[in-house]
Amino acid sequence: MRCGYIKAGERAFRVLVQKTSIMEDLLFAAKYPFSRRARDILSEYALTDDYDTLEKAYEQTVYWLNEQDYYSELKGMENASPSELEFKVVCFPLAKIMAGVAGRHVLSRLGKAFAKRTEVFLVNSGEDSSSLMKELFGDTEKVHVKDFLENRPPGIKLAETGLDRGWVPVNRELGIKLVSRAVYNSILSTRTPKGLGKNILFFAGELAKETFPEEQVTGPVSFPSFPPCIRKIISDLESGEKVGHAPRFVLATFLANIGMSKEEIVKFYEKQPNFDRKKTLYHVSSVFKGQGSAKYSVPSCRTLESYGLCVRDSTCKWSHPLTYYKRRRRKLS
């Protein structure tokens, strides 16, 4: 009986190890969907034109294009289900195709987003970049000068690298930057397949119409076009209810991105308890940079949802407040 118990335990242990290994590979692939492990998973899939799948992939793509808080995404993936992780892997090639069809500027933005995302993930996850270095450059401690020049991180000069007989020595910091830059270049070189279905072309067209964070909206301000989440924050401010820092900041960044001045924005906070014009102007000014343009991007709908600030109604059809504003303004004009 004891022997049988031990064997059963060994089988259970092997199953546990196998499941753990699968989850580790899946998590790695979701973090780095350009990796070999991700490609192994994708080998079981075929390109789809299913509307529902592509709609979700489109929303994920917009999130990647708009999001800047990659650390939060990283932490969220630690508790993600296998299906959620696998979907991120599947979305990556769909995102590249849609961005490629949408235009070079969208594809470039996707490349920059994933380069930054990769760098944040490698720095904060504690993972060694050596496996990605080996995969991308064939070595873990050095890269050939040709590969270095093709993927040279901004601000790093070849003369500062310790070049030795055609090879550039690589430490952890430089390795992360090289991997990130290689990801950008890889995405930028994406070739769009021929014979794409009507649904993926439709969502690529929608992607081309998206308003991204740094694209400030110009023209007269249209208050009826404000998204529900922004209207809710304004309503809370006007009621005299004490409003926290996060919604205050979201409102200021939104108003700055649609072209309102500092003084105009300050007026929205006048009914707050203990309102101090000088202090409010100081804080509002922090969301601006030179020439009165917005310094910070408006958080995406997914980020607002994580803050508990998402307020949806039947008019919410987009995944970013600025996109909502721009489309509604066009429709109401």
Image (cartoon, rainbow, N blue to C red):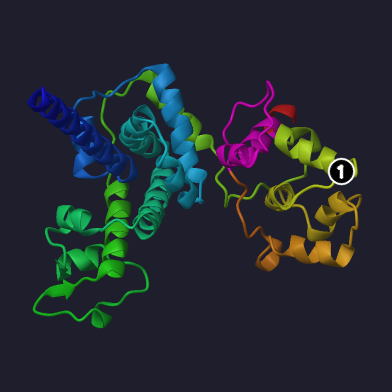
Quadrant in which the N terminus appears: top left
Position of 270 compared to 96: left or right?
Answer: right
Is residue 222 at least partly visible in the picture?
no
Q: Position of residue 70 (x, y in %)?
A: 46, 50
Residue 273: image location, x then y, percent? 90, 53
Kind of residue indicated by mark 1: Glu
Q: Is residue 287 left or right of residue 21?
A: right
In this view, the residue in front, 187 or 60, is: 60
Quarter of the picture holding the C terminus = top right
Verify whether residue 188 appears in magenta: no
Q: Which region is colored magenta?
A: 300-329
- Can residue 263 be seen in the rendering of this structure? yes
Magenta stretch: residue 319 in it? yes
250 versus 202 height, above or below: below
Q: Callout 1 environment at 10 Å: few (<14), some (14 to 19), or many (20+)?
A: few
Which residue extends farthest front? Answer: 1
Q: Which residue is found at the position 46% from the left and 42% from the top?
A: 76
Nearer the observer, 59 or 134: 134
Q: Is residue 35 above or below residue 133?
A: above
Q: Residue at x 32, y 67 (%)?
A: 153
Determine which residue is flagged by label 1: 241
Image spot of residue 94 (x, y percent): 34, 32
Report which quarter residue 212 is drawn in: top right
Left or right, 163 with reference to 322: left
In this rendered view, identify the residue nearer to me: 74 or 177. 74
Residue for point 40% across, 53% down: 112
Secondary structure of residue under mark 1: loop
Q: Which quadrant of the view contains residue 302?
A: top right
Q: Where is residue 29 shown, x and y percent of the image?
A: 28, 41
